[in-house]
Image (cartoon, rainbow, N blue to C red):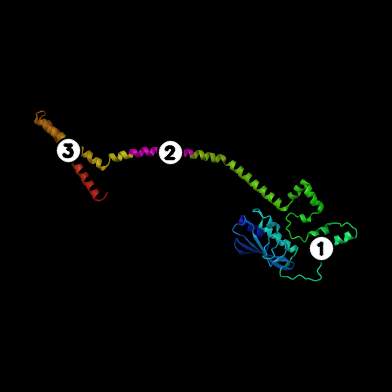
């Protein structure tokens, strides 16, 4: 929004000079054949906070602070909102100074033969007419002459209304509402409000159009979550099975099984010898069974010794 406001400054005004990017700008205007400069300062809170406009040289004008040169009472500054256009505010100030060139503060004002102020002239005219027995006619010229010296800001344009129109505003609510509805800054705010409402409506329609897609993706996400849970359970079961198998095929467990098998084969050969000595088997049967059991014993014993050597080597290698 800050960039958009700066863009409006460059769109509605000529000779915009960038003093400091995004913070300070300078715009020149013609004021009665003399050039004036308006320095635009954008604080850190802009556009949420109003900008600061300083005119140089300092002018004698109801909008301008005669000490600092800051433009304080311009309608665009008084009625500033976040939706105001910076470019239009500066443009309106420049046009006011171009159409009604004010004096500079450092200019001397003649003290002799100066015409009376409009208000004093109007008062003298009124007093003279009353002395002559005439009722004063407060026409347009007299009304403007009496109201023009006021230094109060007039953002609502009340100075341009007649006494009858002001009375009607005070008494007729319908006329008052119609007058307020035609105020430029209020119409601008209404236009921006309509744009915001249209944007909200468009966004709501877009959200409704995406509702089905969101529901489908939500269902897909729930399905994937359920599948993930089932896969997790399967992994847990397979991991437990792996742990059991790892224990069954661990080197230490295999060594224990070999030791048991060696002991079993040794006991079997001893049993065959005892049966032969007891006369329970003949020579042929004894030799066949004894040789097979001793052969099995020898093979298992060799595997056991080989495994023990390998385990010892692994322990020495710090595995």
User: In front: mark 3 or mark 1?
Assistant: 1
Can you say whether 147 is above or below 34 in the image?
A: above
Residue 54 drawn in magenta: no
Q: Earlier in the sequence, mark 2 or mark 1?
A: 1
The magenta span reads 222-241
Q: Residues within 10 Å of mark 1 (few under 14, many from 20)?
A: few
Which quadrant of the view contains residue 159? bottom right
Say which residue appears at 46% left-offset and 39% top-offset: 225
SS for callout 2: helix
**What distance separates the C-alpha of mark 3 from that of mark 1?**
139 Å
Q: Nearer the viewer, residue 312 or 135?
A: 135
Query: Label 1 near label 2: C-beta < 8 Å?
Result: no
Quarter placement of the N terminus: bottom right
Query: On residue 297, which mark appears?
Result: 3
Q: Earlier in the sequence, mark 3 or mark 2?
A: 2
Say which residue appears at 13% left-offset and 34% top-offset: 270
Q: Residues within 10 Å of mark 2 (few under 14, many from 20)?
A: few
**Residue 281 at x, y = what percent?**
11, 29
Q: Which residue is mark 1?
A: 120
**Residue 316 at x, y = what percent?**
23, 50
Q: Residues within 10 Å of mark 3 (few under 14, many from 20)?
A: many
Residue 240 drawn in magenta: yes
SS for callout 1: helix
């Amino acid at each position: 929004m800050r960039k958009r406001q700066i863009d409006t400054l460059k769109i509605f005004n000529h000779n915009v000079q960038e003093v400091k990017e995004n913070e300070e700008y300078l715009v020149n205007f013609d004021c009665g054949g003399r050039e004036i400069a308006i320095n635009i300062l954008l604080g850190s809170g802009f556009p949420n906070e109003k900008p600061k406009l300083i005119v140089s040289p300092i002018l004698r004008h109801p909008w301008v602070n005669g000490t600092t040169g800051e433009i304080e009472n311009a309608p665009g500054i008084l009625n500033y909102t976040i939706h105001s256009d910076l470019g239009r505010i500066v443009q309106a100030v420049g046009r006011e100074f171009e159409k009604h060139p004010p004096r500079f503060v450092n200019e001397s004002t003649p003290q002799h033969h100066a015409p009376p102020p409009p208000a004093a002239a109007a008062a003298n005219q009124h007093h003279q007419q009353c002395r002559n027995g005439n009722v004063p006619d407060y026409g347009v010229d007299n009304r403007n002459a009496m109201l023009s010296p006021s230094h109060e800001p007039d953002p609502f344009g009340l100075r341009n209304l007649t006494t009858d129109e002001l009375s009607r505003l005070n008494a007729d609510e319908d006329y008052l509402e119609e007058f307020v509805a035609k105020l430029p800054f209020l119409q601008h705010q209404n236009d921006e409000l309509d744009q915001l409402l249209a944007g909200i409506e468009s966004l709501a329609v877009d959200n409704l159009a995406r509702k089905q897609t969101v529901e489908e993706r939500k269902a897909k996400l729930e399905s994937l979550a359920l599948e993930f849970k089932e896969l997790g359970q399967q992994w847990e079961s397979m991991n437990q099975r792996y742990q059991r198998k790892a224990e069954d095929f661990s080197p230490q467990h295999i060594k224990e099984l070999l030791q048991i098998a060696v002991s079993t084969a040794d006991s079997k050969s001893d049993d065959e010898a005892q049966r032969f000595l007891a006369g329970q088997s003949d020579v042929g049967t004894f030799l066949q069974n004894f040789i097979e059991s001793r052969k099995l014993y020898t093979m298992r014993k060799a595997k056991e010794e080989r495994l023990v050597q390998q385990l010892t080597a692994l322990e020495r290698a710090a595995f």
